[in-house]
Image (cartoon, helix red, strand yellow):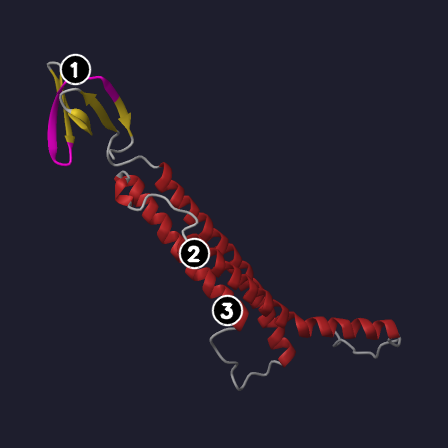
Amino acid sequence: MSAPPRITAPTGRASPRDLLAAQERHRLAREALPRIRAAATGWRNAAGVLMAGLVGFGLVKGRTDVGQLEPAWAAAVGFLLLAALVCGAWGAYLLNRAAHGPLATVPAGSRATRSAIEHRETRTALRAMRRGIGLGLGCACLLVVAVGTTWYGPSAKGPALEVTSPGTGTVCGTVTRVAEGTIWLKSGGTTTQIPLAGVTRLRTVEACP
């Protein structure tokens, strides 16, 4: 059976430099948690301003109605907006967690020292702040991608045709039929027959005015 370890007194004495270094480490450890709290508060406020700028003030806008997109693209936009909402909400919670601490109290019977509790909370708050920042930036990116999809996604309706002729004037609508030198344009529930022989101008447009 091996002998138990022996505890011996230190052989040397601490120098003034060692004492100053120990005091500095103690000061940094004591101020770490307040610094992280302040940083998390700043990041939380910055994320709030960014979201307010993107959404509230309309700095980024696309189509006002995703129903104008093809169904698959409209569903993709909805998924991106939902993902942005989840990321933003979870990121805001984590940043508030880092800024103000957990929604819990330390058990009265805890034997951990105050310095140990603060050190553990410092590490937890730092981890929450990093994740909250990442989720906040992810929310902004998802929101921009969703709006960009509404810009460049294919329309649910095909391109319209604008036809000008002496007999009908300028008519804009979607082509429903072409036969026997006549084109049928549907616009606003009304179908107009236009003889192609009398057409003076014909062009495709993104949407009818």
Q: Nearer the viewer, mark 1 or mark 3?
A: 1
Determine whether the residue tagged by mark 2 lies in a helix, strand or loop.
helix
Residue sitting at the far bottom: 108
Q: Is residue 25 left or right of residue 111?
A: right
Q: Percent position (x, y) of residue 83?
A: 38, 52
Type of amino acid at the residue the image marks with label 3: Arg
C-alpha separation, residue under disc 1 versus residue under disc 3: 72 Å
For label 1, count other residues whose C-alpha is less than 10 Å away and answer few (under 14), some (14-19) or many (20+).
some
Question: Which residue is painted at 44% across and 49% down in the image?
Answer: 59
Determine whether the residue tagged by mark 3 lies in a helix, strand or loop.
helix
Q: Quadrant of residue 9?
A: bottom right
Type of amino acid at the residue the image marks with label 1: Gly
Q: Earlier in the sequence, mark 3 or mark 2?
A: 2
Quadrant for the N terminus, please: bottom right
In magenta, the rendered stretch is 187-202
Image height of 70 relative to 54, above or below? above
Q: Which residue is mark 2?
A: 87
Q: Is residue 165 left or right of residue 136?
A: left
Type of amino acid at the residue the image marks with label 2: Cys
Determine whether the residue tagged by mark 1 lies in a helix, strand or loop.
helix
Q: Which residue is mark 3?
A: 97
Image height of 133 relative to 158, above or below? below
Q: Percent position (x, y) of residue 160?
A: 24, 29
Residue 53 part of the magenta-drawn span? no
Q: Which residue is mark 1?
A: 198
Q: Is residue 148 visible?
A: yes
Question: Which residue is painted at 37% across and 48% down in the image?
Answer: 80
C-alpha separation, residue under disc 1 versus residue under disc 2: 58 Å
Count how many numbered circles sit on residues in the image. Answer: 3
C-alpha separation, residue under disc 3 versus residue under disc 2: 15 Å
Q: Percent position (x, y) of residue 111?
A: 59, 83
